Amino acid sequence: MFEPIAPGPRIGHNVGAGAQDEKQAELKMPKSLRILIWLAVAVLGAFALATIALHRGEQINAMWLVVAAFCTYALGYRFYSKFIAAKVLALDPQRATPAERLDNGRDFVPTNKWVVFGHHFAAIAGPGPLVGPVLAAQFGYLPGTLWILAGAVLGGCVQDFVILLFSVRRDGKSLTEMAREEVGRLGGVVAYVAIISIIVILLGVAALIVVNALKNSPWGAFTIAMTIPIALFMGLYLRRLRPGKVLETSVLGFILVMLAIWGGQWASQTPQVAGWFTLTAPTLALLIIIYGFAASALPVWLLLAPRDYLSTFVKLGTIALLALGIIALHPTLHMPPLTRFIDGSGPVFAGNIFPFAFITIACGAISGFHSLISSGTTPKLIRRETETRMVGYGAMMAESMVAIMAMIAACVLQPGTYFAINSPAGIVGQAPETAAATISSWGFPITAAEMHSLAQAVGEQTLYNRTGGAPAFAVGMAHIFSNSLGGQAVMAIWYHFAIMFEALFILTVLDAGTRVGRFMVQDALAHVWKPLGRTSWYPSILATSALIVGAWGYFLWQGVKDPLGGINSLWPLFGISNQLLATVALCVATTIIVKMGKAPYAAVTLTPLLWLVAVTFTASWHKMFDPNPRIGFLAHARQLAMVPATAANSRLIFNDRLDAFVTGVLIFMVALILIESAFLWLSVLSGRKQAGVKETPFVPSGFATEEQG
Amino acid sequence: MNSWNSEFQQLTSRLKSCLSVFRAVLREIFDESAYARFLARNRLSASRAAYGEFLQEHEVAKVRRPRCC
């Protein structure tokens, strides 16, 4: 006999309008008016998309991208996500969620949907949606924008939504556990390997972005160096002086960071101090590797937690500020819709639009990493099943909007400036005049004098060869901010604010990722020898930290030493591994839908799955076997082997072969889970295997009774 | 006049409700709600020692929480 659960006092438990209010508001409006409004949204969206896609030879306003995005998201949420919720997943408001059944006030807490939405968005929003679109802007704004919109509405949002719901129906189980239970043992192993690989590659690439943004930049290096003592101070302040006052501490930390940015200007203009903070890429890489190792071994409350709070505070504020800046300034896009580099000869990274645009923009369109968040903390906070739609589908739409803003920030730059910042010296040449002449010869005029005055305006010695996307994004953001607030006089402050913002949360990803990876390795090693799994045993902590830091540190070092800037080979590798993780998540989701007896609707996850298989397998093939040395790892290794052997050359050849091997292993593993899943689907559909999912049995929800009453 | 008054009251109550949601979101993201729940669950009052205990309990969940790319 079910007894309604008395929810008790909960922070954020009963705030805001409920689902019923939403429904009531909808019912108040006459049906004909609702149809008219949605028709208007559809027409406006189509018109905005047509403007984006069909304008040639004329610059367009960034607001067309914003309008197209809002209309696409509104239609996707109102119709597609509603269809999935009703027909495919059959969300049940009467069914108790694990947050309600297992409520312990610690891991499982029924929480207001808006609060969960904010929490989930803060966890999924990282540097990816900012960097990917900036890099993909080398094709022009059109391919990236269309992929962000279509990828999110039909793929990314769907993945986040279904994985969240399936995890909710399984007591908040992780993706690996669901893969093992629903697909098979092999599925669990593949998910585990994919997660570890993506963490390692992600951390290597993220660190490389920071290195490229801070090399030879005393202002930037000083500001970021200062965030370490600021985070330590925050940790101590929170622990000793004002226990539990996290928001207050974060505001204080933010003020100190702003002072550090201001102090950075002084540091860059004081020759002796500037000398200490003018660091080469290899030095910065070594410092970040040492920092990563130390941060993963220090107590969480001292560095990781305060840095995480600070970075979240800055991240949410800056994203809101950027949105306001774009709306206030509504800038013109200088980048054409399509550039000559759609043929695959791009200087930022080599490769054709298909498949490379689709792996370059992962977060913002579809990101496998989100499936870890959707099957992590979030399902344990969901109060009612019906709220998974807003949290899973809705938060991904917000993340996708961040990617659109990043695309705008990159495309407001003059194309010549964009390519000068993002092209490696190996392509455009080391000397400013040579680089400017090469870029101008591509049809994007730029002079060395223009680049010099821009560098001076943002307080840098040079902006050439700053690959990785972060500096180009920072220049675009500084352009938008300084034109909306403060004018050109504060452009340097805005630029370093943007650099600090990106570096800060990349370093947070580095801290958190190293620890997550360390725990995963410890969990696995515990099967070999139990003490290795003990998370408080120092020899195990040090050994596993060294293993994870060594792995991503290797990729970082490889990127720093790469004459093509590192991003050319490492970002696609990251994109491939992230999309392969999404492939695993969609395999699990499709399997569950088939086993639920909903095979006719399996297309909702099968379609993005097939697309990702096409994209990732083609991209992997190109990265391994393409005869163009700028694209194919093995072709590049062969090219290097033809010149007289040196130690550095041998290392580069080894790196190319290693990258090809890693790509091959990932593809092989994902092919295995695909084959295993496909066999399972056929067995269930042909009746050879009984359908049935491993869901937690139905328990009626107390919240449903509460609302009905 | 009365209808204006009620409209205004409705607006302010909605605004207040929005602000309370916003505050709740921030408190959840920044773990202040988790600390309040910890205090309520263990019938403790806010103190340095209580926060130390909370951090110890919370640490395991915090370090296993991935941050997305």
Image (cartoon, coloured by chain):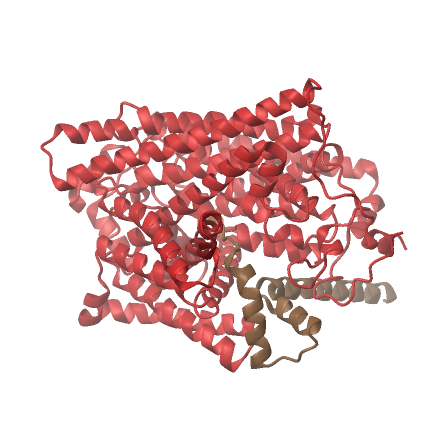
Chain colours: A red, B brown
Which of A501 and B37 lies nearest the eye of the viewer?
B37
Which of A273 and A516 lies nearest the eye of the viewer?
A516
- Residue A683 position within the rendered picture, expressed as x and y whole percent measured from the top left: 65, 21
Tell whether A543 sits left or right of A173.
left
* Point 22% across, 59% down: residue: A279
- Residue A686 in which image quadrant: top right
Taking the view exactly as shown, the residue that stands out farthest to the left is: A644
* Point 65% across, 50% down: residue: A379
- Residue A691 position within the rendered picture, expressed as x and y whole percent measured from the top left: 71, 28
Number of marks in picture: 0
Which of A172 and A687 lies nearest the eye of the viewer?
A687
- Residue A631 in which image quadrant: top left
* Point 46% across, 39% down: residue: A194
The quadrant of the rendering that contains the C terminus of chain A is: bottom right
- Residue A644 position within the rendered picture, expressed as x and y whole percent measured from the top left: 9, 32
Task: Give the answer, above or below, for where A363 lies relative to A220.
Answer: above
Task: Give the answer, above or below, for where B59 lies relative to A698.
Answer: below
